[in-house]
Image (tube, rainbow, N blue to C red):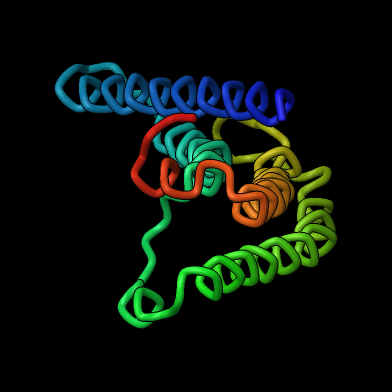
Amino acid sequence: MKAIKILTRILEFLTILTFSALIIVVLIQITGRYTPLSFVWTEELTRYLFVYSIAFGAPVAMERRGYIRVDLLVDFLPKKFKKYYEAFIYLVLGVFSGMLVTYAYDFSLLGEGQTSATIEVEMFYIYLSMVITLVLLAVYSFVNIYHILVGSATEEKEAGVEV
């Protein structure tokens, strides 16, 4: 589990890095509106930084169990059944994410040889963000299943306390 903690720290750092860069690029774009300088690359780079911010941040939210859920009916379940129900939900998410990885990779291959309009980055790398997200979501889904079934940190994770 130490590897998962290291991976989570790396993803947190990359999320902060890409989102901070996004804010800086947006500020450059805003200042460009009020100066004679023209920054045509900012809109495109903002979009790509946002995509990668989500690609790195979504798995961290999965690891922290931070996604919005509707617990109205689930709260009425017995605690033991609720545990297996939550594990089943993460199993479905993990299998679904894992199944989509090959399709996402095939889609990213469509971007080979194509470059973006202004910053001329190969679109393969932009589309690859889907593969990264899906692989990491699958990994964290199975990690959550382990934590739920072993019983470690269920209440602490849901309460938002770092374990």
Of 145 and 80, nearer the camera is 80
> Can residue 21 be seen by looking at this rendering?
yes
Q: Residue at x 76, y 58 (%)?
A: 104
Q: Residue at x 55, y 75 (%)?
A: 81
Compared to residue 30, the image places residue 57 above or below, namely below
- Residue 156 horizontal/vertical position (percent): 42, 41
Q: Residue at x 75, y 43 (%)?
A: 124
> Can residue 51 be seen by looking at this rendering?
no
Of 25 and 156, nearer the camera is 156
For this view, does 130 lie left or right of residue 108? left
- Residue 84 horizontal/vertical position (percent): 61, 70
The furthest residue to the left: 34
Compared to residue 2, the image places residue 46 above or below, namely below
Please give the count of numbered marks on the rendered protein.
0
Q: Quadrant of residue 2?
A: top right
Of 87 and 130, nearer the camera is 87
Compared to residue 69, the image places residue 114 above or below, namely above
- Residue 97 horizontal/vertical position (percent): 70, 62
Q: Quadrant of residue 126?
A: top right
Compared to residue 115, the image places residue 70 above or below, namely below
Q: Residue at x 66, y 21 (%)?
A: 6
Check the picture and name the quadrant holding the N terminus.
Answer: top right
- Residue 54 horizontal/vertical position (percent): 50, 43
